Amino acid sequence: MWKKVCLFFFITMLAFSACQSGEDPIPALNADRGKSYFFMAENKYREYNVREIRYSAVDISDTLIYQLREEVHESFINSQGEESRIIHRLSRTNDTQPWSLDSVWTARIEKDRAVSIENNISIVKMVFPSQVGRVWDGNIFNTKAVDQFKILNFDVLTNIAVNNDLETTSTMTIEQENDEDGITFRDIRREIYADSIGLISKLYNVVKICSRQECLGEEKIESGRFYRETIYAHGFINE
């Protein structure tokens, strides 16, 4: 009987404490948290400096230096009844050359995720609400193997060089893969997004390392691709 009385008193005190504070012990996350990092406003543009190395054999590679521009264009309703945005991707050798259309992608923000269709492959780039440690399968909408993406950090204040100036903005870093054995392969993929800007940095370093006897331990790359993309300007078309 005494135990029951003590238990009742303990529960009553907890209820009274909760009423006094007027707050939940763990506040619920805003369901839209993170959506402004996958910035899809119409007429938004982003421009990047790109360095790309394509490896075809040991000691044989092509290095490309160029610029890339993304333009967010009009929306449309896809076959699943979801609103998507058309993304024009343009490229040029340097800032003395005109932009030339390279490809057309699409992207959409759903209730709990952001999806980009790149060269006809759907990739889940982000999930909502966004918080550090969240993990998801980036390939859930395509036929590729499961690929777990992870939010490494979120709402980190970062200085970025854009439009010939420094901007301080909140960023989200998403790790798509971070795996290597130092002998046969390297697979490092990471993207950084900025609040109300969109993608500001991309690293893709996926290579096969020569493991034959004549080059074992020398970390000579046999095949694969290195790609780094860094924003240098953004704004709105016709601003």
Image (tube, rainbow, N blue to C red):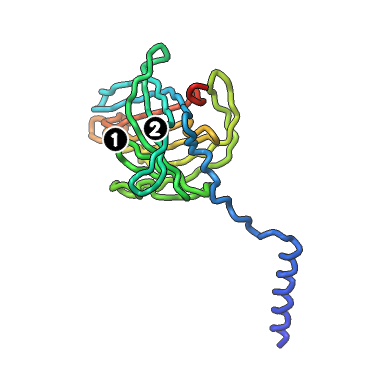
Residue 27, compared with residue 230, is above or below; it is below
Q: Which of the labelled discs sits on residue 87, or is there none?
A: 2
Residue that extends furthest to the bottom in the rendered view of this protein: 1
Q: Quadrant of residue 215?
A: top left
Residue at 29 percent of width and 32 percent of height: 224
Residue that extends furthest to the right in the rendered view of this protein: 20
**Residue on which the image places disc 1:** 208
Q: Which of the labelled discs sits on residue 90, or is there none?
A: none
Residue at 42 percent of width and 31 percent of height: 73
| Residue 117: x %, y % from top left | 35, 39
Residue at 45 percent of width and 24 percent of height: 47
Residue type, label 1: Lys
| Residue 170: x %, y % from top left | 58, 36
- Nearest the viewer among 7 and 58 is 7
Q: Is residue 168 left or right of residue 9?
A: left
Residue 215 visible to the viewer: yes
Q: Quadrant of residue 51?
A: top left
Residue 16, compared with residue 157, is above or below; it is below
Residue 177 visible to the viewer: no
Residue at 29 percent of width and 35 percent of height: 208
- Secondary element under disc 1, as helix, strand or loop, is strand
- Nearest the viewer among 94 and 224 is 94
Q: Earlier in the sequence, mark 2 or mark 1?
A: 2
